[in-house]
Image (cartoon, grey):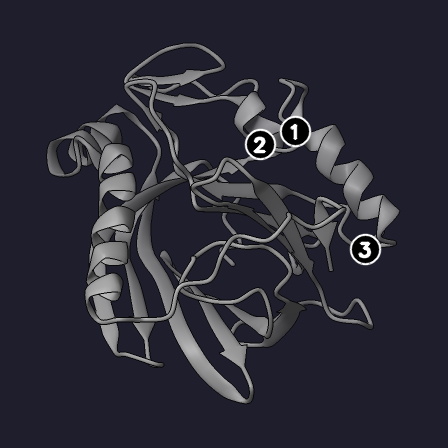
Amino acid sequence: MSGRFAASVCRGAVMHERTLPAHNRFTYPLATLRIPLSQMESLRAPLLGIDRPNVFSLRTRDHGARDGSPLLPWIRSLLAGHRLDEADGEVVLQTMPRMFGFLFNPVSFWFCHDRSGQLRAVLAEVSNTFGERHNYLVAHPDRRPILPGEMLGAAKVFHVSPFFPVSGEYRFRFDSHGPVVGISIDYWEDGQCRLATRLSGREEPLDGAALLRWLAHLPLMTFGVVARIHWQALRLAVKRVPFFRKPLPPSTGISS
């Protein structure tokens, strides 16, 4: 990812394309924050509150242990528990903030670097509409740096969409070209890519002007996420895509 470890706004789009058993594709505008965790406590920007109300707010209890405790010690402990000692540098959290106090965040990403700035591990923090959460930690088995475009896999163990079973695997790719950031998540089952997801955006410095532009273009973004999830579910139901009942969540909160 970007070697510029400065807080930024990343404005772009999210695309989903389902191939089987019925084709369904959509693209929606999206914006996220990219926050180096070492700078989180000192971060100040108009319209943004850190653990306090504002138009945009980033709350520690929405991430990590979800008890309001600091995020950096939590991710350091998690990485150490998975023997990812190489990831001892900056951790950048890419996430949607609360807007006007409301949030549903399908996925956040923690980009874990070494001290030279190379990406070593990524934590994908996933939520579903049933109030459940699960973390996928991806890294190369030999712990080498993750280069742009390289594929990392993780077995699917968590129920997200009722129109897919809990089986198969995710394949992650992370790309960066200057200020342009891209994330790809493909869902594979039985040797076929059943769902392709792309998140892309362009970074700009996190300041009052960037947040005003966000507010002007996407004033109800976090509310719209939930509305669009239900709209797409209705479209799939009309197309008679098979429905899968929600199983029990995995016994552990993290898989790798």
The answer to whether the residues at label 3 and label 2 have Cβ atoms under 8 Å apart is no
Q: Quadrant of residue 232?
A: bottom left
Residue ID for mark 2: 63
In-image side of 190 versus 77 (left or right): left
Q: Secondary structure at mark 3?
A: loop
The answer to whether the residues at label 2 and label 1 have Cβ atoms under 8 Å apart is yes
Whole-percent x, y for residue 159 in the image: 54, 55
* Along the line of sight, the residue nearer the viewer: 223 or 122: 223
Q: Nearer the viewer, mark 3 or mark 2?
A: 2
Whole-percent x, y for residue 181 in the image: 40, 59
Cα separation, mark 3 vs mark 1, equals 19 Å
Residue ID for mark 1: 71
Q: Identify which residue is drawn at 56% across, 27% down.
A: 39
Whole-percent x, y for residue 121 in the image: 68, 57
Question: Where is 162 relative to 140, above or below?
Answer: above
Q: Residue 115, can we see it?
A: no
Amino acid found under the numbered disc labelled 3: Glu
Q: Nearer the viewer, mark 2 or mark 1?
A: 2
Residue extending farthest top: 52
Q: Identify which residue is drawn at 40% across, 63% down.
A: 243
Residue extending farthest bottom: 191
Q: Identify which residue is drawn at 71% across, 64% down.
A: 139
- Which disc is residue 86 wearing? 3
Q: Secondary structure at mark 2?
A: loop
Cα separation, mark 3 vs mark 2, equals 23 Å
Q: Secondary structure at mark 1?
A: helix
